[in-house]
Image (cartoon, grey):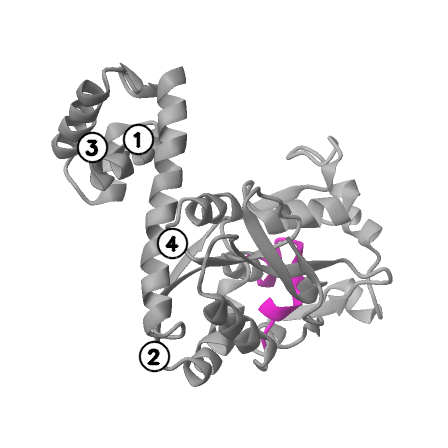
């Protein structure tokens, strides 16, 4: 039994497909399949039920794979402890960021982090919250910058800042004459949202509950439309298709030449941005360096929070 074989079975369980698992491990499918079969023969049990186009984990396999994941996490801790012994602010740090934060925070975070920890090499992963959560638990990344709500066993979190939402309309829209927009007014317009699976979409729908009504369908007067990214949505709004809700940090001076950006009326909807890491992650100095780099950046407009706002 080898660590490589354990990585392979964890990947197959995650992907439910030998081909995709092989790709994620950067090996050929035959290499991975032979290694998994060899481990099953060594253990004397089947870990997976194989069918055309489908792979299912057996009950015994589920227990073994859960333990394999713990072994891989502990191996990662050993490596991190060795790195920490050399210099906790040196070596590679793997940071995950959700799509609706990364493009706006990273240009401010990276220069400041280079000042605080010049020997730290930063590997970045942009993805959805669900995927970053899995990568965090599996030791594929060390830290993640996410938005609440977020609750996962074995993961510690620390609040970083709060960010208001704003409304964006095409230039010349009647709302330009208003000082602020009540969330209920969105039900009067075609509203562009991110595609399902993105946490910012869920936050907007939670804040503006009228957008969840069944009447908001393609055949109705008011519709919710979808875009693949905030950039795409901004271009669609500028083209006159509808209005949208954006996180305040995503709005730039360039956007305001094409869009009208308006504040919400009180209570202003917002999201809390957090830093998350595995509880056994040993490089505490690296965690603090990232936190300080964010808090000391010139990212605006955000509402900074005290360090005491920590949840375990």
Tell me the mark number nearer the camera, choosing from 2 and 4: 4
User: x, y (%) of residue 35?
Assistant: 16, 30
Is label 1 in a helix, a strand or a loop? helix
| Above-or-below relation of 275 to 51 | below
**Mark 2 vs mark 3, CA separation in Å:** 36 Å
User: x, y (%) of residue 195?
Assistant: 54, 44
Task: Give the number of marks.
Answer: 4
Give the labeled residue for mark 2: 119
Give the labeled residue for mark 4: 77
Mark 3 touches mark 4? (CB < 8 Å): no
Q: Which badge, 2 or 3, comes first in the chain's sequence?
A: 3
Tell me the mark number nearer the camera, choosing from 2 and 3: 3
Q: Residue at x 69, y 58 (%)?
A: 271
> Which numbered circle lies on residue 12?
1
**Mark 3 vs mark 4, CA separation in Å:** 20 Å
Q: Residue at x 23, y 32 (%)?
A: 19
Q: Which badge, 2 or 4, comes first in the chain's sequence?
A: 4
**Mark 4 vs mark 1, CA separation in Å:** 23 Å
Mark 4 touches mark 1? (CB < 8 Å): no
Tell me the mark number nearer the camera, choosing from 1 and 2: 2
Classify residue 249 by image quadrant. bottom right
263 or 256: nearer the eye?
263
Q: Which residues are magenta?
A: 236-252
Q: Which badge, 4 or 1, comes first in the chain's sequence?
A: 1
| Above-or-below relation of 151 to 299 | above
255 or 57: nearer the eye?
57
């Amino acid at each position: 039994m080898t660590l490589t074989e354990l990585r392979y079975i964890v990947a197959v369980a995650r992907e439910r497909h030998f081909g995709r698992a092989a790709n994620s491990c950067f090996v050929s499918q035959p290499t991975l399949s032979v290694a998994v079969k060899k481990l099953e023969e060594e253990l004397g049990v089947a870990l997976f039920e194989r069918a055309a186009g489908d792979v299912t984990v057996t009950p015994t396999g589920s227990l073994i794979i859960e333990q394999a994941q713990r072994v891989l996490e502990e191996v990662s801790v050993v490596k991190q402890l060795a790195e920490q012994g050399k210099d906790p602010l040196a070596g590679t740090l793997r940071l995950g960021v959700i799509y609706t934060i990364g493009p706006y925070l990273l240009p401010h975070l990276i220069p400041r982090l280079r000042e605080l920890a010049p020997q730290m090499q930063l590997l970045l992963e942009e993805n959805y919250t669900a995927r970053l959560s899995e990568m965090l638990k599996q030791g594929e990344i060390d830290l993640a910058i996410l938005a609440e709500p977020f609750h996962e066993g074995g993961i510690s979190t620390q609040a970083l800042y709060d960010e208001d939402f704003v409304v964006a309309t095409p230039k010349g829209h009647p709302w330009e004459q208003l000082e602020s927009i009540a969330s209920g007014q969105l039900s009067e317009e075609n509203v562009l949202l991110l595609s399902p699976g993105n946490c910012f979409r869920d936050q907007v729908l939670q804040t503006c509950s009228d957008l969840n009504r069944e009447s908001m369908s393609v055949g109705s007067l008011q519709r919710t439309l979808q875009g693949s990214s905030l950039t795409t949505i901004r271009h669609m709004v500028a083209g006159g298709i509808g209005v949208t809700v954006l996180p305040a940090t995503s709005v730039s001076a360039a956007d305001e030449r094409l869009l009208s950006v308006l504040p919400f009326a009180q209570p202003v909807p917002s999201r809390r941005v957090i830093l998350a890491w595995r509880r056994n992650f040993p490089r505490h100095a690296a965690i603090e360096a990232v936190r300080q780099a964010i808090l000391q950046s010139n990212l605006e407009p955000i509402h900074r929070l005290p360090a005491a706002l920590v949840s375990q």
